Image (cartoon, rainbow, N blue to C red):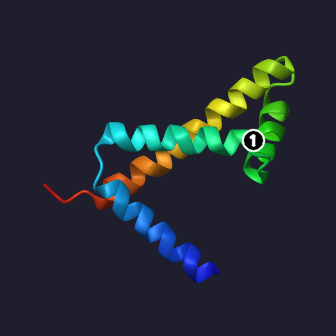
Amino acid sequence: MRIIFGYLAIAMVKLMGLMSLGMTQRVGTWIGQLLWARPTRTREVAKVNIELCFPEYSEQQRDELAKQSLIAGAMTATEMGAAWGWADG
């Protein structure tokens, strides 16, 4: 199973290299929203970390910050994939 995940990750990086920056950012936004919408470990870790860092924020504010954090992280991942896949020039 790990081998399959590895091949999928490589394919994703190569696919991002074929896209424009704007497109990779949209894909990253979608992935981040998907991570937030599903009860993933990533979402729970983000929520706990935000709660520890910002205890004075309301739960709604912390949730919004955690959601934006997941989106930004996913965007960074897709942008890195694109940058690695772009030709030198």
Q: Camera-side residue: 77 or 40?
A: 40
Q: Is residue 38 above or below residue 60?
A: below
Residue under circle 1?
Answer: 46
The three-letter code of the residue at mark 1 reads Ala
Q: Camera-side residue: 71 or 11?
A: 11
User: How far across and how far down the image is residue 85, in percent?
Assistant: 30, 60
**Quarter of the rendering occupied by the C terminus:** bottom left
Residue in view at x 36 percent, y 41 percent? 23
Q: Quadrant of residue 11?
A: bottom left
User: How far across and how far down the image is residue 59, in percent?
Assistant: 85, 22
Left or right of 86? Residue 59 is: right
Residue in view at x 48 percent, y 76 percent? 7
Q: Camera-side residue: 78 or 52?
A: 78
Q: Quadrant of residue 54?
A: top right
Residue in view at x 63 percent, y 35 percent? 69
Residue neighbourhood size for the residue with mark 1, other residues' Cα within 10 Å, grouped as few (<14), some (14–19), many (≥20): many
Left or right of 44? Residue 71 is: left
**Quarter of the rendering occupied by the N terminus:** bottom right
User: How far across and how far down the image is residue 22, in percent?
Assistant: 34, 36
